[in-house]
Structures are given as C-alpha cells and as structure tokens.
C-alpha cells in the first residue's frame, strides 16, 4: 500500500511516498529530463532525516519521473532568474553537497533505480547510493570538462572508490558517454535489465533488504565505509561496537531460533 502523505516533499518537483518498508524519492522535472534545481536538492535532506528516525523504513529508493531520464544534470536555467550568477552557483553547490552527503551518510541502504539519461549530477546521486540498478537503455556521463566547472572532492572520491582511479580518469577526462553494458562491466552499476524489468528488480531488492536484520545491514554499511578509508583513519573501535551490538541484539537470537526451527526470521531492528 502506498502512503503519499506521511512523507511530504517541500517541492512538487520531488515526489516521496512509502511503499511497504521502502521510502521512494522520485525526481520530478521531466520537462528538463529531471535536471536538478535548488528546490529539488533542498527537498532531499529533510526526507532522509525523517526516514532515518522511522523504524518502519528499511531502505530508500531514488528514481526519475518518466522513462527518458534518471537525472540529466543541473537545471542551470534557473540561474538567469537569480540575483547574481556567482551567488546562484555557490548556493546551488551548497545545496547539492548537502543532499549528496545526506544520501552517502544515510545509515540505511539506498538504491538508485536508473532509466535513461544519468548525467552529471545524476551520476553523483547514483554513486552516493549503495546499489545501482539500471535499464539497458541507460546512458552515463560526467561532462564537467565540457562545462569548465569544478568537481567536488566527495563526488570524485565516490567515483574512484567505485570504479578505481584509472576508470575514473577515463570517465572524467573524456566526458564520454557510457552505455549500460560498459557501466556494468566497470562496476558503475550493479545490475542491468530490460526497461520493463526494472520495477520487478527493484521490488526484489526491496524484499531482500527489508527482510534482512536491520542492525546487521547497518553495521555492514558502516564498516564497508571504514574499509575504504586509509588504515590510519579507520575507526576499529566503532566497528567492534557495531558487531557486538549485532550479537547482543534480539534479532540475533531470533535469527538463530528461526534457523533451528527452519522458518523465516522476523527481524525488528532491536
């Protein structure tokens, strides 16, 4: 059952609704191929903050309205209507960074459901997510070098962590477009399906993730982030506490009992 009222977006250009254990956040600017405007970036952090505190939400799914685009980049047309272009760009960057870091730092799993164009800011959104599911007709590109803009450190780190420095340089220096087959081959996306199969694949992932032990998933996500840090920066004590919390949880007892009783466990995140 869809719940469209519990998570109200601050702009009509971002839709948000609950479907079971998943919060869906959809970029809704189809006239501009879902290009991201300031109000769209601003809508994301409060939705994630509410989902973070809601035990009923096990994961968040990001998508784009329509069949042509996930996100096609920045909606720079609005800058002409603002008082000063430099101030507008600065504000846009601040809002974008806040939203992207909010996705990256979100404690629960996130999925990018990609159909069509995934360009610039769209790539940044997708690589801030944990899992990327794409249709075979999806197209990926980071055209920063064609626009002369700076590319933020956090986004570059996410790209390098995902595909490695050599492939990140290829993608970034050339600004070329990658089809879904190449994106899958280099690890930019996790799975590729025909357009008509995306909804079913997303539903499968929602089911698999939402029936897993929440504390174990949370610990795994955080520990993977620590693994990607330099050894000197790794918080081993925090990792130890997260693992101990899993073993001391009611869910661990439930998992063991369900295994012995040959039934599916009913995890509660406690």
Image (spheres, rainbow, N blue to C red):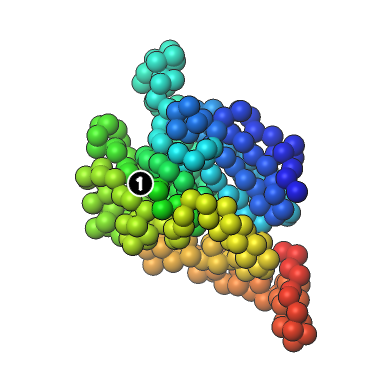
- Within 10 Å of disc 1 (Cα), the crowding (few <14, some 14-19, many 20+) is many
x 72%, y 83%: residue? 259
Res 128 seen here: no
Q: Secondary structure at mark 1?
A: strand
**In the image, residue 147 above or below residue 165:** above
Q: Quadrant of residue 227?
A: bottom left
Can you give x and y, in whole percent of width and height, for residue 100 in the image?
Answer: 48, 43
Can you give x and y, in whole percent of width and height, for residue 43 in the image?
Answer: 58, 34
Quadrant placement of the C terminus: bottom right
Res 31 seen here: yes
Q: Quadrant of residue 84?
A: top left
**Which is nearer the eye, 212 or 251?**
212
x 41%, y 63%: residue? 228
**Which is nearer the eye, 132 or 87?**
132
Q: Quadrant of residue 253?
A: bottom right
Side (left or right) of 260 relative to 11:
right
**Which is nearer the eye, 184 or 105?**
184
Side (left or right) of 187 relative to 12:
left
**In the image, residue 116 above or below residue 246:** above
x 40%, y 48%: residue? 137
Residue at the disc numbered 1: 140
x 33%, y 62%: residue? 185
Can you give x and y, in whole percent of width and height, for residue 239 in the image?
Answer: 55, 68
Q: Residue furthest bottom?
A: 260
Side (left or right) of 117 relative to 129:
left
Can you give x and y, in whole percent of width and height, for residue 201 in the image?
Answer: 55, 58
Number of disc labels:
1
Side (left or right) of 240 relative to 245:
left
């Amino acid at each position: 059952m869809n719940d469209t009222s519990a998570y109200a977006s601050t702009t009509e250009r971002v839709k948000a609704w609950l479907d079971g254990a998943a919060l869906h956040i959809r970029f809704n600017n189809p006239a501009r191929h879902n290009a991201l405007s300031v109000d769209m970036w601003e809508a994301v952090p409060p939705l994630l903050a509410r989902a973070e505190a809601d035990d009923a939400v096990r994961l968040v799914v990001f998508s784009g309205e329509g069949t042509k685009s996930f996100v096609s980049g920045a909606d720079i047309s609005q800058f002409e209507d603002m008082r000063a272009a430099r101030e507008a760009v600065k504000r846009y960057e601040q809002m974008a960074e806040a939203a992207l870091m909010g996705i990256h730092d979100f404690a629960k799993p996130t999925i990018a459901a990609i159909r069509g164009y995934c360009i610039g800011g769209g790539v940044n959104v997708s690589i801030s997510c944990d899992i990327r599911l794409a249709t075979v007709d999806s197209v990926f590109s980071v055209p920063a070098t064609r626009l002369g803009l700076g590319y933020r450190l956090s986004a570059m780190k996410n790209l390098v962590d995902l595909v490695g420095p050599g492939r990140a340089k290829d993608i970034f220096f050339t600004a070329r477009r990658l089809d879904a087959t190449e994106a899958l081959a280099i690890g930019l996306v996790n799975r590729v399906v025909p357009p008509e199969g995306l909804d079913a694949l997303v539903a499968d992932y929602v089911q698999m993730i939402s029936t897993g032990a929440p504390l174990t998933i949370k610990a795994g996500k955080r520990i993977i982030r620590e693994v990607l840090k330099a050894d000197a920066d790794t918080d081993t004590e925090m990792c130890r506490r997260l693992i101990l919390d899993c073993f001391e949880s009611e869910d661990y007892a439930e998992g063991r009992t369900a295994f012995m009783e040959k039934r599916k466990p009913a995890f509660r995140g406690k």
